[in-house]
Image: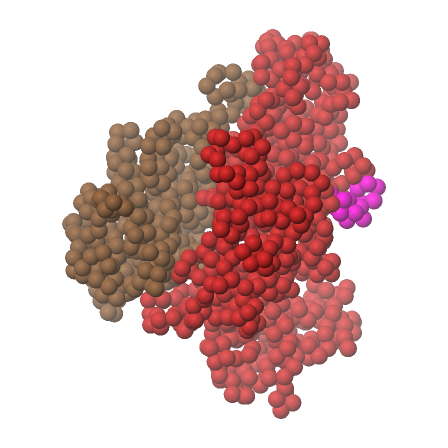
Chain colours: A red, B brown
Amino acid sequence: MERKNVCASALLALIAGFAVSCGGKGDDLDKSSACLDNRQYFEEKVWQPVLGNVCVKCHAPEGQAAERAAKFLILPASYPGFLEANYDALSEAAKTEYEGRSQILQKPLGKMNHGGGQLFTEGSPEYNALSEFIKRVKAPVTCGSNAKPSPLAAVELADAELTIRKAAIHLVGRLPTSAEVARARAEGDASLDPMLDEMMNSPAFLDRVKEIYGDIFQVGRYNNNALDLLDPADWPGRNWWNPSDIPYEGLTEEQKLGEKNSELAIAAEPLELVANVVRYNEPFGNIVAAPYTMVNPYSAKVYGVEGKVTFSSADAYEFKPVQLTVPKTGQPYPSAGVMTSVVYLRRFPSTQTNLNRHRARMVYKQFLATDILRVAERPLDPSSVTSNTPTRDDKYCSVCHKVIDPIAGAFQKFDNDGRFRPEATWPGFMPQPGLGTETINDVREYPAALQWLGKKIAADRRFVNATVYTVYEALTGHKPLDYPASDAPNFQNKLSSWRAQDEMFRAAATAFVDSKQNIKSVFKVIIKSAYFRAVNVNKAAAEGELESVGTARWLTPELLSRKVKAVAGVGWTKSLKDKSEWLLSDYKLMYGGIDFDTITERLTDVNGIMANVGRRMANEMACRVTAHEFTKPKAERLLLNGVELDTVPDDPLGVPLPAAEATIKKNLVDLHYRVLGEKLSVEDPEIERTFQLFSKTYRELRELKKPDLAYDCQGRWDLATGADLPKERVVDTDKNFTVRSWMAVMTYLLSDYKFLHE
Amino acid sequence: MDRRKFLQAAALAGMAVMVPKGKTPKANAAPRDYKGPYFLLVHASGGWDPTMLCDPKGGTINRQFEKGNYGSVAGIKYAPIEYKDQAGAVYYSNDQFFQKWGSRLLVLNGVDTTTGNHDTGTRVMWSGQVAEGYPSLGALIAASKSPGNSLAFMSGGGYETTAGLVPLTRVNNVGAFSRLAYPQLINPGGTASFHTKATEDRIARMQRERLDDLMNHNGLPAYKRTMGALYTSRGGDNELELLAKQLPSNDKLNAARYGVHRAGLLALSGFKSGLVIAATVSMGGFDTHGNHDQSQGQRLADLLRGLDGLFEDARSPEFNNILDNLVVIVGSDFGRTPMYNSGNGKDHWNITSMMMMGPGIRGGRTIGSTDDNFKAVKVNPGTLQPDPGGVRIQLEHVHRSVRKLAGLTTDPIAGRFPLAGEDLPLLA
């Protein structure tokens, strides 16, 4: 039975710290109050003042109640998904009754042998809040139209057309096609899902997914030395390309290619596995549970499985899943998604005393949305430890170790170098392999413990959270908001921000589960949300309000590199001959990128050096493409297809030419749209500003009377090949002073906030 | 409001990178009147073992030397350890380092990090608080001393949190840097520019005006913050040129064999340019859960040799003898256990040491101590002598002292990040 339109008095809540359901009909609803559904009620009236303030002191995982084996445990806010977990735990606990009353009312009254004694009295605000919660468990409350208004209601969103543009840049590194733009204009938001689906079925999207998970797995460190990670005693085919062990300089080109492509394949295994899961819409949990390994035609030989898999060609970039066999035993290799890949295991190595805990920590962080180090970050005093096995016996240590050690145990058949060793032994003081309260009890199953673990992780709600958070961070550049500390300044504003974001996360999680763990569903929910689409709000947010709404993201070197190419038609390469991209080579780290080795955290805030990278890019690209545009017929141009070299704003006497001005402004409107994603009219002040830049530059140059165009900025080469253009197409002078005027405009736009951010 | 005042005000509001409504302050007006001291924060990542360094124990705690056996200089005792290569030849020793620099060094022993957790330890070491959210000491000093200077805080690793006070700068490619210092030149070595000077100025002015309008018409914090960040980071052409002129050559960098020295040279160049106010340097490998004596010893030797080389450079004419105007603080996540584990390693221990030197820090002294079990001994808050009724030295005490040294006691930006505990007279 549901009770509808139940309200809670905001005034009463403020005074008493709890609310009583008004019950009944909609006409009971006080205009100054808002209805709280069950979850909202729990969060506002039960979690905040009662569980999170009182009960958690003993019922946290490392608390006294836990030490006394209490069944009812409360996760502090440092645990991901703590609210859902605690809501579920309390709902479940509420069902157990004693003398006709729920135990969650009896215990804090000091009854039922409550270890913490009496905490509340009957009729106290805390007691009443719990009492109301119990009623709601039996008769859930929904609010319908009386629900509390979302703080996002005042937020202005990008329309479908600009949303698909932004999504295209993020997901597939291109601008939307004209067909996509037309569809977005015609169908509005209804067009987004199908168009996003199409984008996410493209190879470019798979590359983006690999980039996202590459940041997490950090296996890019091994791009040039992955073969060395394999033990040739385990994998006799490791050096298949050089069976006679010839010195490198004596190898044929074919052999060198064999090595290079084998190297590439081993390093790419984990990310190719993720891509395969996405490509074929497998349940995303397969990234930790798939019983296969990804190989290309070269690594298939390394692993000795070339007979088990068929490739369409010798393309090093064609990867197929295959079940590996351990050559020594002929038994199946116990593949468990990325966790059993040697590059993954080596990227997160273990030691004789670390005993796979580092790996376990990474598993928690990457797949269970839990930073185990945050769980126990409160002050402690390990120097007071007396036990010989403190990780097991001392509460300072065991708070984390009892969580991570079972996962560490699941890695026990993989040695410190990532080699599968089914005969390996495990210290007796370490717990059995497991996850949470579940363990593997049969030692014969230990060699396949990671497969067991992978399936458990894939089915864990925290894996859903981890996936949602990963996609969110990739799309927005923001980390999920932390639940605010109760004494934080502007707590209510921050709480409101957290709630709104949490609501979106839950929607994405639901979509993920409902789609049988198709990660594309998560992308779609987040892209359609205010967290991706918000562009403004109707009044300035107060401190703590609307945090993380809208991406406003400083583009990574990789994203900017693709955007430059998408907008300008050519990339920012070192030269027309040398195709290495500045942003992916010399400037990658200084622009905030990572090298997967010593620098593993991206910079998200621009600094002076990064700003100058943007400026140099804008200058060099403006130099490269502007004159070149005029070497092509209008119909083939990307940027300046409305003007010609002699389209000048003034006549030789300085008298404005209205028709020319209109033509130039029309082109500026197109440029603002293409470069910045702005839909402006010719009357817009921004167009006028850019026009002023153009016309003032034009006048300055005309007065200087110097038509010389710097050699590097001349239009004399085919930008794709670097070859010389036919003489009749060459633009090697600026006699009309318009090339450099348009260069100024291009520099202005390519170094604009909206170009450098998405 | 001029740029400096505006940025100070914005920083106070937690929005160092936000620009108020109205006209954009003049660009290129970032103050350059800060004359030091500069701050170099050196992090030994992973948790070093002070008992092999400046809090010698010997015996069961240190298998390399007997209990009671130690070297000394001024008021500092140090472990009598010689670092040897595989052939047994001594390549460096604590003696060399401490005899050379000990009279300048202040050692803090028995410092309680209150954690055995790497992330938390790193955070509390360099922010003074266990919980998240506080900026690195370097970011705080940089933001306070040089508001609006986008290069004031340079990172060579370690705890990099800025809390939005100041941009974080990484410089790793000296060769490519010159192209960035002169973005207006087609080739950095030449004179030809992409645009005339007047056009350059016009573009810059119109960009500022546009950014102003965008900021003033957008109420979302994420947009305001990032627009402000772009504003703050621009207008620094002269700054990058200054820095580019001071950067060491690749040959000099390559000649510095140890990471701390190499990264430190970039920091010294930044200090010399007057732009960088605080810098971090980090060196890993101290998390020696196995084969402790050898592994930890190698890292400590590299750290000390790196510092040795860096200090020598810092007191050379090439760097204007900046050592006399440089505060150096060396710390780690935490310490290591007094006992060896089954792999001859040492695990995490919340008690650690720090080493400091610079103007305002009286060297040749040791403050604080540990007992025979390498547990912290409480000190009297007034005399700093052992006192069972006293307090344990914690990072909040250290940070209070360093903030005071940096003149941040009443600084409103620092006031947004209050520290627990009481003032201890640690430095003077």
Relative image position of residue B236 (x, y in whole percent): 47, 31
Does residue A730 appear to the left or right of B253 in the view shown? right
Magenta stretch: includes residue A269:
no
Q: Looking at the image, which residue is at 19% across and 52% down?
A: B80
Which of the 4 quarters of the picture holds residue A699? top right
Q: What residue lies at 45% left-to-right and 44% top-to-bottom?
A: A598
**Residue B49 shown left or right of residue A722 in the figure:** left
The image shows residue A529, relative to residue B176, as above or below, that is below
Quadrant assignment for the N terminus of chain A:
bottom right
Residue extent of the magenta highlight: A183-199
Q: Is residue A290 visible?
A: yes
Viewer-side residue, A162 vs B73 = B73
User: Residue A500 location in percent, x, y?
Assistant: 65, 58
For this rendering, which residue is in front, B159 or B250? B250
Which image quadrant for residue A435? bottom right
Q: Residue furthest right?
A: A186
Q: Was residue A197 drawn as part of the magenta stretch in this picture?
A: yes
Name the outermost residue toward the front. Answer: A244
Residue at left 36%, top 67%?
Answer: A381
| Depth order, front residue of B165/B111 | B111
Q: Position of residue A162 (x, y in %)?
A: 73, 40
* Rendered position, A151 above or below A756: below
Vertical position of residue B175 compared to residue A112: above or below: above
B209 relative position to B275: left or right: right
- Residue drawn at x 68%, y 28% as measured from the top left: A569
**Residue A498 in sight in this render:** no
